[in-house]
Image (spheres, helix red, strand yellow):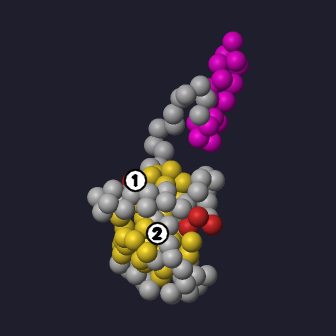
Amino acid sequence: MRRIKAAIALFSGFVVALGINVLGASTAGASALSFSCDSSAFCLYENIDYGGGGIGFHPSLHPPGTVVYLQNYNFDNGHDVGNSASSMVNHTGYSVVLYDFCPRDGGIYAAKPHSVDKTLVDNNFNDKASCFTFS
């Protein structure tokens, strides 16, 4: 009986260590940050507070002035990025301009270099970004 209890305890510890959710049980201490933004990237997150899926863009792959159409990309969870971003992190040395309608029509949201915004809701830009440029 002790061996069975020890095996169950070991298995339970293994499941928690891997972060496996069994029968709705949650693992304590899980990070709120779902996607880790590279230190030289501009990142968008699907939900406020950097939750849901995430995606990073590097200025070296998207030179300043180049329009990046977000409908061509998916968050790391497979969901569409276009018109679905709710928070952002800008670790680049560039300003980033998000546009509501593309090509560059409609409203804009400007992110300063090395800035973060945990909710685009406050700026009336939640789920509106269609494209962006580094500038």
Residue type beneath disc 1: Ile
Q: What element carries label 2?
A: strand
Q: Name the residue under label 2.
A: 101
Residue closer to the observer: 33 or 52: 52
**Residue 76 sits inside the magenta stretch:** no
Which quarter of the figure is the C terminus placed in?
bottom left
Which of the numbered marks, if any, corresponds to residue 62?
none
Give x and y (percent) for residue 106: 40, 71
* Quadrant in the picture for residue 49: bottom left
Which span of residues is magenta-colored? 1-20
Residue 40 in view (yes/no): no
Mark 2, other Cα within 10 Å: few <14 / some 14–19 / many ≥20 = some
**Does residue 14 sit above or below 38 in this rendering?**
above
Residue 59 in view (yes/no): yes
**Residue sitting at x 47%, y 38%:** 28
Give x and y (percent) for residue 58: 56, 78
Q: In the displayed orientation, state which residue is furthest to the left.
A: 122
Which one is in front in this view, the residue at disc 1 or the one at disc 2?
2
Q: Mark 1 points at which residue?
A: 48
**Does residue 53 sit above or below 71 in this rendering?**
above
- What secondary structure is the stretch in magenta mostly built from? helix
**Residue sitting at x 55%, y 28%:** 24
**Residue sitting at x 59%, y 41%:** 19
| C-alpha distance separating marks 1 and 2 | 21 Å
* Quadrant in the picture for residue 119: bottom left
Residue closer to the observer: 105 or 82: 105
**Residue sitting at x 29%, y 58%:** 122
Give x and y (percent) for residue 72: 63, 66
Residue type beneath disc 2: Phe
* Quadrant in the picture for residue 80: bottom right
